[in-house]
Amino acid sequence: MRFIQKMNKKTRVLLKISGEALQWEKDHGIDPEFIQNLANDIKEIHESGIEIALVLWWWNIFRGISWAAGWMNRVSADYMGLLATVMNAIAFRDALEKTGMKAHIFSAIDIPEIWDKYIQRKVISKIEKWSIVICTAGTGNPYFTTDSWGVLRALELGCDLMIKATKVDGVYDKDPKKHDDAIMIEHASYKDVIHKDIQVMDHTGITLAKDGNMPLKVVNLYKKWAILRAINWEKEWTTIS
């Protein structure tokens, strides 16, 4: 029996997936089997009545900030990172289409031979026509993180919730890899995150979420149905609101 039940009301969600998570157990790149299984799960969630927009990070392909800290100019590194998000988007679109879903890429960097230019009304129209949309290439500008870009797109597209899917169960009071007594934070306010410097996302993204009253959930992408449970507002993960 499927875990999913048909939703009574359409819910629109921005799902931000870390590039590192797409590696699965590889040290870089994309794990094809994992990404296809994730696409299958997203199909079932989508078919339950949930509208989905995706934002994919670049970390599995190009570690831009770490390069910029070394020999490369930060602006150049960021642009290479933006192009890496496009590579992830193309791979994920293919996985989604193999499940029979309609999927469209919208990019802030205009390359019409490969994808459509990001235009808010056009993206919303595709969502309303029951396509999954993948927003890529950030805002088209350097010095803008994927967290901030994800919140921006969630607000522009009228989403009810932004989910940050990572390799951990939520946000902790300290690094759980280094401290056995680390405690997961089940809920925090935007103000708590900013004033206590809780490491969930950068301050620009949190400020955008606060100003737009966009609730955030941090979930473990590797746990079955974690995304759906977050959408159903179960208390298993970290909520920022």
Image (cartoon, grey):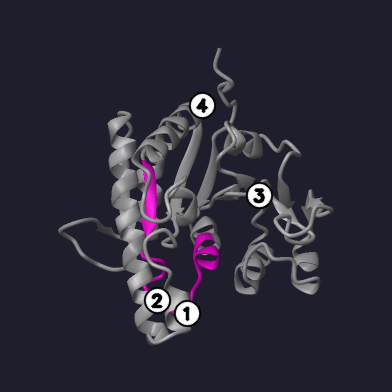
Range of magenta residues? 132-150
Crowd band around label 2 with a 10 angstrom C-alpha radius: few (<14), some (14–19), many (20+): many
Q: Find the residue positioned furthest to the top.
A: 1
Front label number (3 vs 4): 3
Q: For mark 3, does the 10 Å Cα neighbourhood hold few (<14), some (14 to 19), or many (20 or more) residues? A: many
Earlier in the chain: of badge 3 and badge 4, it is 4
Contact? badges 1 and 3 (CB < 8 Å) = no
Mark 1 lies on a secondary structure that is: loop
The first of marks 2 and 3 along the sequence is: 2
Residue wearing tag 4: 48
The residues bearing labels 4 and 2 have C-alpha atoms spaced at a distance of 37 Å
In the rendering, which numbered label is found on residue 143? 1
Q: Which residue is mark 3?
A: 217
Q: Amino acid at mark 4?
A: Ser
19 versus 70 height, above or below: above
Amino acid tagged 2: Asp
Picture coordinates of residue 227, whole percent (x, y):
58, 38
Residue type of the residue flagged with mark 1:
Tyr
Q: Are marks 1 and 4 in contact (CB under 8 Å)?
A: no
Q: Are marks 1 and 2 in contact (CB under 8 Å)?
A: yes
Say which label, 1 or 2, has the lower sequence index: 2
Which of labels 4 and 2 is toward the front?
A: 2
Say what secondary structure mark 2 lies in. Answer: helix
Which residue is under mark 2?
Answer: 78
Q: Quadrant of the N terminus?
A: top right
Give me the residue at 49% from left, 65% from top. 146
Q: Residue at x 42, y 58 (%)?
A: 60
Instruction: Please indicate whether residue 57 sits to the left or right of residue 107 in the image.
Output: right
Mark 1 or 2: in front is 2
Quadrant in which residue 205 is drawn: bottom right
Mark 1 neighbour density, 10 Å: few (under 14) some (14–19) many (20 or more): few
Q: Of marks 1 and 3, which one's residue comes earlier in the chain?
A: 1
